[in-house]
Image (spheres, rainbow, N blue to C red):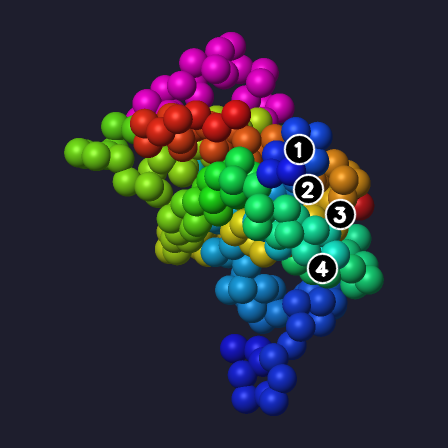
Amino acid sequence: MTEEDPKLCHEIYVQLPALVAGELDPDARAEIEHHLAYCPACQFEWRDHELVWRCLTQCEDVEPPETLRRHVFEAIDEYERTLARVRRENS
Amino acid sequence: MPGQGNARPRADEELMVAYQRGDRDAFEELYHRYAKPIYNFFRRAGKPEAAEDLAQKTFLKLHVGRARYVPTGSFRGWIFVLARNVLRDEGRRQARRPDPLEEFNDERTRWRAREEGGKEVGILVAEALAILPLTQREVIVLNRYHGMNYAEIGQVLRISENAVKQRAFQAMRKLRRYLSAAEGKKSAP
């Protein structure tokens, strides 16, 4: 097999996001890894995907504001009060 | 707190069924488990400034629609469907405003203005996510930050697994271009 096969490379390329996300079944993964082992162009693409995927972890979770809980429960209480009033008016 | 002292914490689905029966402590526990993921979903998939408001709307929707919950699927999938619907409603509401694009740009400007000195990767990533269309952004956010696989995401977004894969591909291509350009590297093909 030659090092670069544009058609095969394109097929590999479109699978890289799924590979980096761990979404490929073992057979598909093995096929791509086999190709990556000898194709420098796809290796370059793969490293780029890995880098972006790692970068995404830099956007870390933060704690919600402490006011959120109070606002949620107030909104629910307000909804229940409104519902009760409407039911009273309609009865 | 519910679940404490028991050998096994109650599953989300059990808590939701308990809440349907009026157990407010069950809702407290669900809030405790999901406030952070839902809030961060909106931070990344929606507008950071509106994340608290949108998270509040999601929990209110959960309360209002609690009778419709059927414990056949995962609770996590269900609450993210609610969150996603809130996000869609917000998008439609924004679209009715006179110049939503201008507001979006202002927001990005403010977002950028927070940084001092060199851009940190976290800020770049947040910017990169912000330029994605919502349909692509929510796939990346649910996959990368909420650990959902493509099948689960398909259920939440009500699209095929293949469509999820396609959106992830398009999103990754744009993220690579944005981050590569920002880093002054050669743009990806």
Residue type (three-letter) at the residue carrying disc 4: Pro
Q: Which residue is mark 3?
A: B155
Q: Which residue is mark 2?
A: A1
Q: Quadrant of the C terminus of chain A?
A: top right
Q: Residues within 10 Å of mark 3 (few under 14, many from 20)?
A: some
Dots 2 and 1: beta carbons under 8 Å? yes
Could you say whether the residue bearing mark 4 is in a helix, strand or loop? Answer: helix
Left or right side of B57 for B182: left
Viewer-closest of B19 and A80: B19
Residue type (three-letter) at the residue carrying disc 1: Asp
Question: Can you tell which mark lies on residue B127?
Answer: none
Residue type (three-letter) at the residue carrying disc 3: Gln
In the image, the segment drawn in magenta is B90-111
Residue type (three-letter) at the residue carrying disc 2: Met
Mark in the foreground, 1 or 4: 1
Q: Which residue is mark 4?
A: A26
Left or right side of A36 for B52: left
The chain identifier of the residue carrying mark 3 reads B
The chain identifier of the residue carrying mark 4 reads A
Q: Residue furthest front?
A: A1
Same chain for mark 1 and mark 4? The answer is yes
The chain identifier of the residue carrying mark 2 reads A
Dots 1 and 4: beta carbons under 8 Å? no
Q: Is residue B114 above or below residue A38?
A: above
Could you say whether the residue bearing mark 1 is in a helix, strand or loop? Answer: loop
Q: Is residue A34 above or below residue B103?
A: below
Separation (CA) of disc 1 from disc 4:
23 Å
Could you say whether the residue bearing mark 2 is in a helix, strand or loop? Answer: loop
Question: Can you tell which mark lies on residue A5?
Answer: 1
Q: Residues within 10 Å of mark 1 (few under 14, many from 20)?
A: few
Would you say the magenta stretch is mainly helix, strand or loop?
helix
